[in-house]
Image: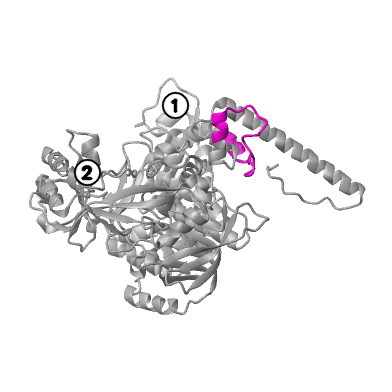
Amino acid sequence: MAASVKSICVRCMSHMLTKKLPPVQSVLFLVSRRASQLSRQRYDVIVVGGGHAGTEAAAAAARIGAETLLVTQKIQTIGALSCNPSLGGIGKGHLVREVDALDGLCGRAGDWAGIHFSVLNRSKGPAVWGPRAQLDRQRYREFIQAELLSTPRLKVLEGSVEELLVSDPNPAEPGRHRVAGIRLANGSQLISASSVVLTTGTFLSGSLFVGQTLSPGGRMGDAPSSSGLTQTLRDRLGLRVGRLRTGTPPRLLKDSVDLSLAKLHPPDRQPTPFSFMNTHTRCKPAEQLPCYLTYTTPGVERVVRESLHLNCHIQQDAKGPRYCPSIESRVLRFPGRSHQVWLEPEGLTSDLLYPQGLSMTMPPDVQLRLIREIPPLHRAEIHTPGYGVQYDYVCPTQLSPALQVKNTQGLFLAGQINGTTGYEEAAAQGLWAGVNAARRALSQPPAALSRTESYIGVLVDDLVSRGVTEPYRMFTSRAEFRTSLRPDNADLRLTMKGFELGCVSAVRHHEAVRVRCSLQNAIAALQALTMSSTSWKKKLPGISMSENKNQALSGMDLLQYKDVSFEMLASVFPESLASYMEFSQRLKIEAVYKPHCDQNKSEIKRIQSEENMSLPQDIDYFTLSVSLSQEVREILDRFRPTTLGAATRLEGMTPAAIANLFKYVVLTRRQESMMSGKQADNEEERGEEPCKRNASLPQ
């Protein structure tokens, strides 16, 4: 059975990277024609927005089994890479792998469209390696569009949403409002739904800045979302809305750049796929394109300072991304320094370069002056000028861990509308919002991911528990248990759970089960190979092992040594280990991190216990008979954490406050358990079946 499953999966992997995508224009024509037939129809889930969050949300909802409608302003821009043509990186690569483990799109799209693959942070441990790829913009967009337009139960409509349809809430559920669907911008078309997912990106009341010119829009050439949508969120639903900003660099004509003056950075010789379903990438190793590194000069700083009065974007109060700032922000924050500029290809046949690190919003003529202060760009020509974007976002502490707005039943938010930055963060939120939107529409309970089991869980928990003051970016340092949450084991952590939720296909599930069983068998075989260190030295004379140690060591113990590889052990014990060679790197990583993961188990168990202690959402913290300071009560009332675990991570919460809150939760749970028991006894005395009661705190 395992062999047949493996052969099926290998055939699927091969087909996935050799299949011929349908002509995009012909498919788009068919979808546009179908869209004209949509009139006052009802869907389980409506997704607004066709970016990374929206595409993952729509696909996930449809995989769950919900009849889904994706509404986007332009069908041609579905899956467009609005800024950097890349995917993954440190922390971000973890998210891509987890999205893929849950059968999302972006990992497979990256393998299809990648033209320069590299694993960042290789000088450190595998837990913090960052799989990354430069992408061909056109290939990526075509893959996403082809996947969506061939997904069962998913339809696409080109249009703009004017407002949300809001009705009275279901009294059996928490919330003051209930979303009932959308109204399109033409005002005549109403489409109803049980769940709506907003993934508006930078388009929510978006404004574009170039020099002193301001125009409405969320991306150059595209209009912003309707003002009515912002009005619904702020005025009708009473949500707290803030303002953030971001920017993008000018695109340069490749032929005008002297790349001989920049440092060549080749890709990895052997590309590492993002998807667990792919054994290789579409782009062959020899076909990959290089990137180039150069640096800013004092002339760049001079141009920035001389043109500040011409740059209204940099003078705005809206917060920009800390970890991907504009060149203006870099110069002002770190004067006198030289800053990296990466010259990255935009596609196999593209004549453009993307200068990462040169996001700018000054007038186009000043942008040209600035880039020509950099040696390789001394004759560069600009194809498209850089620009800045300001947009509205909803403070994410108003969301539940399912990414549903707490006060509005059926309304889910994902992506930059929640205050994040980056394709990967958006994709992760979109997938999870899509899963929960579909589950709600199908009358299923919400699903949750703990920060102990995934980076998606870390991302969601950070957003809903702590909120944002600037665009949020994922880093491995945000995860407490990063030795357990590695890129290599995302399938083992999430695919089985995704299959139970309904968002993972049977083919992927079979492959994950095969991998899990093979790894378990391989680890058992390694642990069975136990002998003294002296005996191991005789078997492997080249390894560095202390002569004084004579305790028994297993094959797993030996793999923890830096100079011991699985291939070495398999060559000595081929009858036991040779059949597991395809997992050699994964087994090495498992062995290296086993002591760390074992140490983390008790702490993970404690956190999971706290996560299971729910806090009622209608609790009045100001009158709660618990010893809490006024400051702590205000924090709890403002953020309203859903669990004790979420409360522990709020800034300003003291250990004493957590201890007292813990006592309150335990006492309340005990009292409810006693009341439930007394009620059951009374019913038994009356000869009735004990009724089932949903307590606000789990037992």
- Left or right relative to 484: residue 617: right
Looking at the picture, how far across and down is residue 597, in whole percent?
Answer: 50, 35
Q: Residue at x 36, y 42 (%)?
A: 129
> Between 691 and 656, which is closer to the camera in this rendering?
656
User: What is the span of residues highlighted in magenta in the rendered image?
Assistant: 605-634
Q: Which residue is mark 1?
A: 534
**What colour scheme does the image use?**
one colour
> Between 608 and 381, which is closer to the camera in this rendering?
381
Q: Residues within 10 Å of mark 2 (few under 14, many from 20)?
A: many
Q: Amino acid at mark 2?
A: Ile
| Cβ atoms at labels 2 and 1 below 8 Å apart | no
In the rendered view, tell whether residue 262 sits above or below residue 409. above
Q: Residue at x 12, y 56 (%)?
A: 381
Q: Residue at x 79, y 43 (%)?
A: 676
Work out which quarter of the rendered image holds the N terminus and state it: bottom right
For residue 643, which quarter of the picture?
top right
In the rendered view, tell whether residue 699 sits above or below residue 440. above
Q: Residue at x 71, y 38 (%)?
A: 669
User: Residue 646 magenta-drawn?
Assistant: no
- N-terminal of the two: label 2 or label 1? 2
- Left or right relative to 695: residue 414: left
Work out which quarter of the rendered image holds the C terminus and state it: top right
Looking at the picture, how far across and down is residue 482, in whole percent?
Answer: 45, 38
Q: Which mark is residue 327?
A: 2
Q: Amino acid at mark 1?
A: Thr
> Mark 2 to mark 1: distance in Å?
59 Å
Main SS category, magenta section = loop
